[in-house]
Image (tube, rainbow, N blue to C red):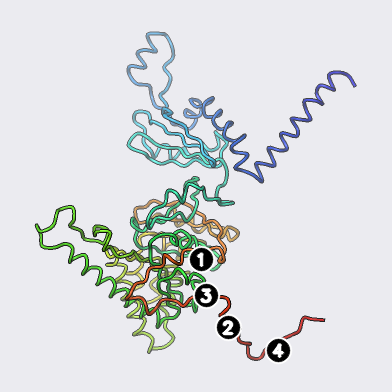
Amino acid sequence: MDALTTTLLELGAPASVLGSGALYAKAKMPRTYWATVGLPLAIHRIRHDYTVVMEACGLTVEPSFWRAMASSATNQPAKPATPTIRSMKASSTGLRVRLRLARGQQTEDMVNAAERLRHAWEVHAVHVSEVKPGVVDLRIVGFDVLRNVRMPRRAAAKSGLLRVPVAMRADGTVHYRDYRQAPNGLDLGANQSGKSMYTRNLIHGLAPQPVALVGIDCKRGVEQRPFAPRLSALATDQGEALGLLLALLVEMDDRYDLIRAYQGVPGSVAAEDVTADIWGLPERVRPVPIVVLVDEIAELFLVASKADEERRNHLVTALIRLAQLARAAGIYLEIAGQRFGSELGKGATLLRSQLTNRTVHRVNDVETARMGLGDVSDTAVAASTRISPDMPGLAVAGDTSGLWSEIRTPYRSLNEVAERCAEFAHLTPVIDRLAAFRPQVVTPANVPPSPATPGLVPVSLGK
């Protein structure tokens, strides 16, 4: 073996090991690969071929008059003007590039070129958002952050009262559910689509906050009873649900009376103390906010006989009143269901129109997607119909402003959320109007044995 062959082997073996390690990390540890290999490569591609890529993607404009004159005076060809890079900021999932658009360009030009930029820079995705007129952010995502969701540690630190992190967005940012901004929400999705996981993440984030959680679960409470230590009220059938909703209406009226009492006669209180909702009240008298979680809305609408129709009408009327009026009283609705359309009965469409925040998981038909996102964006409807069954928790979230994004909730076991509710059980507010619906917390020592099912004979598994 000559010296040249020996040298090639000595250099090739480590290179082969490094290459194999990089491929393994890219497939199995995408965050590690992005931080060590993907990010430096992406920055190099952007810096090295920036002008060429902008020109190829149609993101250049004619040079300004003064630049053309300067080029003519120096006998140099005038280069087309490109968006100017203001800053670049790396993250564990991607890279944010802030651009100052060239004269005459608009944000829509960057949006239309996002797919071409993704291929040119060899990254997973490029998302465009406007910062202010003439300035945009390119959120470059290095890998599929929704395949294996890991919420960043800083997400909880950036949460606030009634604002909790519930999912990761496709652009690598955290998706927050903010009840102060969007008081009422609608969550749609088929079985095993991730609706329950979305609710678990909501409860997980709200449990440590000074908030009253109220559950309505007409499946005998099997979904929400594990969270009983942190629930101020729980209804497990239609009869209890009606009583609970009527009690919430009385609580709402009490809070409006409190607000009116603190408004005083015009001119008798300082201008900054006049308020029309609970958030302007002094903290010492401000009632605790209430989040009402409805597990399956259809169970409140469906009737089995003519005699049930009156109760259904009362239920629907109470829900509509809460959705229309309760925001200022600090009462918020989060309603989940497999389908929510006019076929449920009178009042369904009116109630749905009051639910501003929309989250649609995998659905069984396109009509259900239109129910949730039809008034948000046609593109959002199309995106929700392409959700794969092997991606539970993936959803399209939007609101009536027309903005939407793909999100996916992290996995949280029922036991994990139940333990968190038990940990913060001491924060559960006692609301007098809802005291009759406070769930009884059963300790393991007091759990009665399960009754034997009629017709089944116990089988011994012993020898």
Read off the residue under disc 4. 457
Residues at circles 3 and 2 in contact by the CB criterion of under 8 Å: no
Q: Distance between the residues labelled 1 and 2?
A: 27 Å
Q: Earlier in the sequence, mark 4 or mark 2?
A: 2
The residue wearing badge 3 is: 222
Q: Earlier in the sequence, mark 1 or mark 4?
A: 1
Mark whose residue sits in front, 1 or 4: 4
User: Amino acid type of disc 2?
Assistant: Pro
**Label 1 to label 4, Cα distance in Å?**
34 Å
The foreground one among 103 and 268 is 268
Q: In this view, does 126 lie above or below 307?
A: above
SS class, disc 4: loop
Q: How far apart are marks 4 and 3 (CA)?
A: 26 Å
Identify residue for label 1.
196
Q: Which of marks 1 and 2 is in front?
A: 2
Residue type for callout 3: Val
* Quadrant into which the N terminus falls: top right
Residue 54 x %, y %: 47, 29
Residue identified by numbered label 2? 448
User: Tag 2, which secondary structure?
Assistant: loop
Which tag, 4 or 3, sits closer to the chain's start? 3
Q: Quadrant of residue 318?
A: bottom left
Kind of element beneath mark 3 = loop
Residue drawn at the location 71% of the way across and 87% of the way down: 458
